[in-house]
Amino acid sequence: MNKISDQLFADFLTNKPLYSKIKAVESLTKYSSSAFIDHTDFKDKPFRFTCPEEKNEQTFKTDLPEHGYPRISVMIREKEDQLPYTFDSKTRKLDFKVHLHGICQSCKAKIDFLIRSTSDKEWDKREEGMTITLQKVGQFPAYEIGLNTTLKKYLSADDQASYKKALACLSISYGIGAYAYLRRVIENEIKRIIQDIAELDFDGVEFVRKAYENFKVDFQMSKLIDIVNKHLPASLKELGDNPVRLLYEQLSGGIHEFTDGQCMEKAQNIDILLNYVIKKINEEKYQLNDVRKAMQNLRKENG
Ligand SMILES: [Zn+2]
């Protein structure tokens, strides 16, 4: 029998959205309560989760509701061949749902999961080896995909929502969806990214500023991008390729020409690049603010 590690089970609880599946056990040939085929194996599993009371990440442990499960007598079967209570008497396949509490080890706050456990084979064919699959069918409070603080601070509310949807698509390998949502984010944010670049301090920034003023009149993004392509702050130049241009280029062409897998890869790369560009611009912006403040203070003190 091959079984997933506690760590993978923890990742399933913490990071996977509703209806995600995970292959939990392979080549199971006989009844084993440590194989997720009854409720006992779901107990005392540790995982990290944002505590709904304390609002920060804590260690949780799974537990079973006190009165929710049959006592041990139901689980003891008289004969090897007797169908375990978690198997469906019609299909003779494993199909049961377990209600799990997650208990915060710091403040005892409770969260809830409903996990469905199924087998690919009938009990009578277990000797060929069964595969047990777990699926998350319920979670409270609801699963929430979080943006990192950089994105949260920078993106507009609409784009934060689109970005979260993109991450949700990524987490279940819906490449086309993820790519489409991230394109929407680029489309909305690229202007602001360039506007912010125009407010930085670097060699050639005056060209970007002028181009941005022109853009506000003629709305020709490609002209603006051509200028930005030549003039960038050092931190964005060191890549050897222009990341702003590359982001902009993602908007041309349709989605239909790419497979789901290709879109998936593109979306993952855009995610990395957008994070990088926004982080660099933020760093420069705040650094600049700090220096400006320091200079102002020195002037005041001298004046
Ligand atoms: Zn807590």
Image: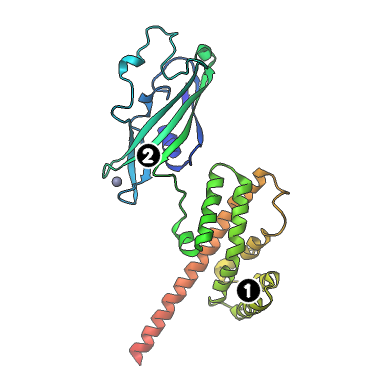
Label drawn at residue 231: 1
- The answer to which image quadrant residue 96 occupies is top left
In the displayed image of the protein, which residue is found farthest to the bottom?
Answer: 303
Please indicate, yes or no, whether residue 47 appears anywhere in the rendered image: yes
Label drawn at residue 267: none
Please tell me whether mark 1 sits on a helix, a strand or a loop.
loop
> What residue do we see at 35% from left, 88% from top?
300
State how many labels appear: 2
Sequence-first disc among 2 and 1: 2
Label drawn at residue 47: 2
Say left or right for 5 vs 235: left
Amino acid bearing label 2: Phe
> What residue do we see at 41% from left, 17% from top?
85
| Residue 230 on image: x %, y % | 66, 72
Q: Does 86 appear above or below 251? A: above
> What residue do we see at 42% from left, 39% from top?
139
> What residue do we see at 36% from left, 16% from top?
75
- Give the distance between the C-alpha atoms of the residues marked 2 and 1, in whole angstroms: 47 Å
Tell me the quadrant of the picture where the C terminus can be found: bottom left
Q: Does 279 appear above or below 71? A: below
| Residue 36 on image: x %, y % | 42, 25
| Residue 292 on image: x %, y % | 43, 80
Label 2 CA crowd tier, 10 Å (few <14, some 14–19, many 20+): many
Please tell me whether mark 2 sits on a helix, a strand or a loop.
strand
- The answer to which image quadrant residue 13 occupies is top left
Say left or right for 269 vs 18: right
Q: Does 47 appear above or below 159? A: above
Closer to viewer: mark 2 or mark 1: 2
In the displayed image of the protein, which residue is found farthest to the top?
Answer: 79
